[in-house]
Image: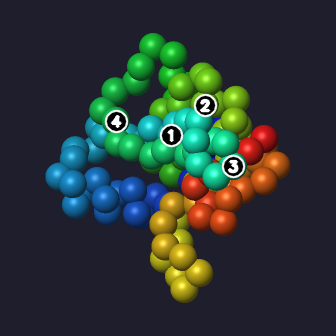
Amino acid sequence: MINITDSAKEKIISLRKEEGLQNEYNVRVLVKGGGCSGLMYDLEFDDGQKENDEVFEDKGVKIFVDRKSLLYLLGTTLDFSDGLNGKGFQFINPNASRTCGCGESFAV
């Protein structure tokens, strides 16, 4: 399961409107190799489920995750912060053994 906070939900809705995307565009969360810690998060809008996707829905937002990425993301919460300590989406991932200072990469 992947969850999102209220602030992440509001930012996703806002970004979707800013980019002129319809409501059928949902969020795809990916894990790719790279970054300071070895693995990186990637977020993008996607208008369709792919064959090997798992689909989660939280607070009315659908989240697509491919099976490979899901192994690293189970139990993760997607948050958004625009405070003094940084701005952007943050992943609260219980599977990460360490994270980079930028918050965009991690290791398990």
Crowding near the residue tagged with mark 3, few <14, some 14–19, many ≥20 C-alpha atoms within 10 Å? some
C-alpha distance separating marks 4 and 3: 26 Å
Residue 36: percent from the left, percent from the top? 64, 52
Q: Pick whichever of labels 4 and 3 is earlier in the sequence.
A: 3
Helix, strand or loop for disc 1? strand
Camera-nearest residue between 5 and 96? 96
* Identity, as a three-letter code, of the amino acid under mark 3: Ser
C-alpha distance separating marks 1 and 3: 18 Å
Is residue 45 left or right of 101 when viewed as pictured? left
* Residue, disc 3: 37
Residue 75: percent from the left, percent from the top? 72, 43
* Identity, as a three-letter code, of the amino acid under mark 1: Val
* Residue, disc 2: 69
CB atoms of marks 1 and 4 within 8 Å: no
CB atoms of marks 1 and 3 within 8 Å: no
Residue 98: percent from the left, percent from the top? 78, 53
CB atoms of marks 1 and 2 within 8 Å: yes
